[in-house]
């Protein structure tokens, strides 16, 4: 489909592919529509496709096998590509993917992507850059868990979810936010309450307004 081809061509991963090679990949792809709560794949499942988000948000999460508590390790938004790791080693999914809201994805099967990379090995550099970005993001998450306390991580995640706006609606539940912070919901709520008490933040239901961004940014360092 030409729409798939155009969307894939705008991603760094596929941007340098020739039109015939990209058309082969696009023709084999299909649109997937998910509603909130739908699980795209589970941790440990065998992989056969990668995905491009065209609308909505997808949480990439790992769960504790003992208490089943989730840790949201990444949030995939429109334009983000994910699920590519199994293309390299055919290993099982390292995390699960779940829709946080109604979402539309392009499902790209591994087979045509492998053919594309074998036809033009130079495109492997795009794959390498994608994986390097993943590694840098995980390094940052690890550093946050070591150097920031729960209050600092909460401030950082709120700023990320605000995406530069001073007023925003929280796109995740309190439980999901806690998973992104890597702490209990009670401790995250306590951190938010402290921001409100200090006058840095205002909250009305799921709508937040940043009053003192510089204070939040300082607390997030």
Image (spheres, helix red, strand yellow):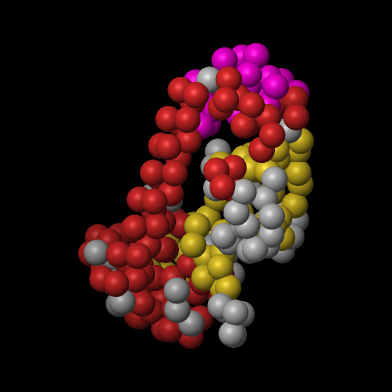
The stretch of residues the image draws in magenta is 1-25
Q: 136 left or right of 93? A: left
Instruction: Identify the residue at image location x=58%, y=73%.
Output: 63
Does 2 sit above or below residue 220?
above
Q: Where is residue 161 in the image (x, y as percent from the top left)?
A: 46, 57
Task: Return the residue nearer the eye: 33 or 209.
Answer: 33
Helix, strand or loop for the magenta stretch, by majority: helix
Q: Judge whether residue 179 can be spotted in this image.
A: yes
Is 129 colored magenta in this rendering?
no
Task: Return the residue nearer the eye: 72 or 159.
Answer: 72
Does 42 sit above or below residue 115?
below
Task: Return the residue nearer the eye: 136 or 192.
Answer: 136
Q: 149 left or right of 170? A: left
How many numbered marks, from 0 up? 0
Q: Could you tell me which quadrant the N terminus lies in? A: top right
Q: Where is residue 199 in the image (x, y as percent from the top left)?
A: 32, 73
Instruction: Identify the residue at image location x=39%, y=57%.
Output: 138
Instruction: Identify the residue at image location x=70%, y=45%.
Output: 48
Q: Could you tell me which quadrant the C terminus lies in? A: bottom left
Does 22 sit above or below residue 136?
above
Q: Judge whether residue 207 can be spotted in this image.
A: no
Q: 50 left or right of 196? A: right
Q: Where is residue 122 in the image (x, y as percent from the top left)?
A: 46, 22
Q: Position of residue 78 (x, y in %)?
A: 57, 42
Specify the quadrant of the image occupied by residue 147. bottom left
Does 120 sit above or below residue 49?
above
Instruction: Identify the residue at image location x=55%, y=38%.
Output: 79
């Amino acid at each position: 489909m030409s729409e798939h081809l155009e969307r894939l061509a705008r991603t760094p991963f596929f941007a340098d592919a020739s039109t015939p090679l990209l058309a082969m990949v696009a023709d084999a792809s299909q649109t997937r529509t998910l509603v909130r709560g739908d699980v795209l794949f589970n941790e440990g499942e065998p992989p056969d496709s990668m995905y491009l988000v065209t609308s909505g948000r997808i949480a990439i999460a790992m769960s504790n096998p003992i208490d089943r508590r989730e840790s949201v390790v990444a949030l995939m938004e429109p334009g983000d590509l994910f699920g590519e790791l199994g293309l390299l080693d055919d290993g099982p999914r390292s995390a699960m993917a779940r829709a946080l809201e109604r979402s539309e994805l392009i499902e790209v099967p591994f087979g045509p992507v492998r053919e594309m990379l074998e036809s033009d090995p130079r495109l492997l550099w795009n794959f390498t850059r994608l994986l390097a970005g993943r590694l840098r993001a995980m390094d940052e998450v690890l550093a946050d868990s070591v150097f920031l306390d729960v209050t600092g991580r909460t401030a950082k995640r709120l700023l990320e979810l605000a995406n530069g706006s001073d007023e925003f609606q929280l796109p995740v539940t309190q439980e999901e936010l806690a998973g992104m912070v890597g702490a209990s919901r009670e401790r995250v709520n306590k951190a938010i309450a402290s921001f409100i008490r200090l006058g840095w933040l205002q909250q009305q239901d799921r709508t937040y307004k940043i009053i003192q961004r510089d204070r939040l940014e300082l607390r997030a360092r």
